[in-house]
Image: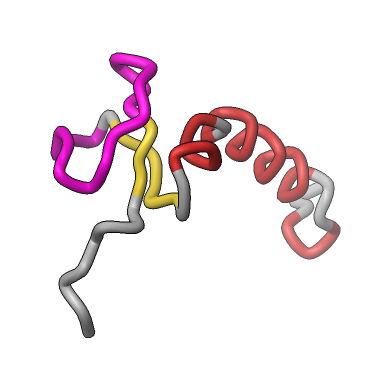
Amino acid sequence: MSDDHSNEWYYNVKTGKVEPYQGEKSADRLGPYNSPEEAARALEIVQERNEAWDNDPKWNDD
């Protein structure tokens, strides 16, 4: 496995900024994402995934 993280981007929920792998190391980051543009959409992506899981009959507890 390669240690090359040059294509990893993160969204920092505390600062609202996109950061490269070498940015802050904390639980305040979402990712990794493949591009800065994708990382900038992190909160939208989380919302989309949550909605998909909420509507997935395999995960429905009702």
Work out which quarter of the rendered image holds the N terminus and state it: bottom left
Q: Which residues are magenta?
A: 12-27
| In this picture, residue 31 sits left or right of residue 41 | left
In the orientation shown, which residue stands out farthest toward the top? 15
In the rendered image of this protein, does residue 35 appear above or below residue 44? below
Question: Which image quarter: residue 38?
Answer: top right
Residue depicted at 30% across the width and 17% down the height: 14
Residue 22, horizontal then vertical, whole percent: 15, 44
Residue 46, horizontal then vertical, whole percent: 58, 37
| In this picture, residue 5 sits left or right of residue 18 | left
Residue 34, horizontal then vertical, whole percent: 46, 54
Nearer to me, 53 or 23? 23
Nearer to me, 39 or 46? 39
Residue depicted at 24% across the width and 61% down the height: 5
Q: How many marks?
A: 0
Nearer to me, 35 or 47? 35
Residue 16, horizontal then vertical, whole percent: 38, 17
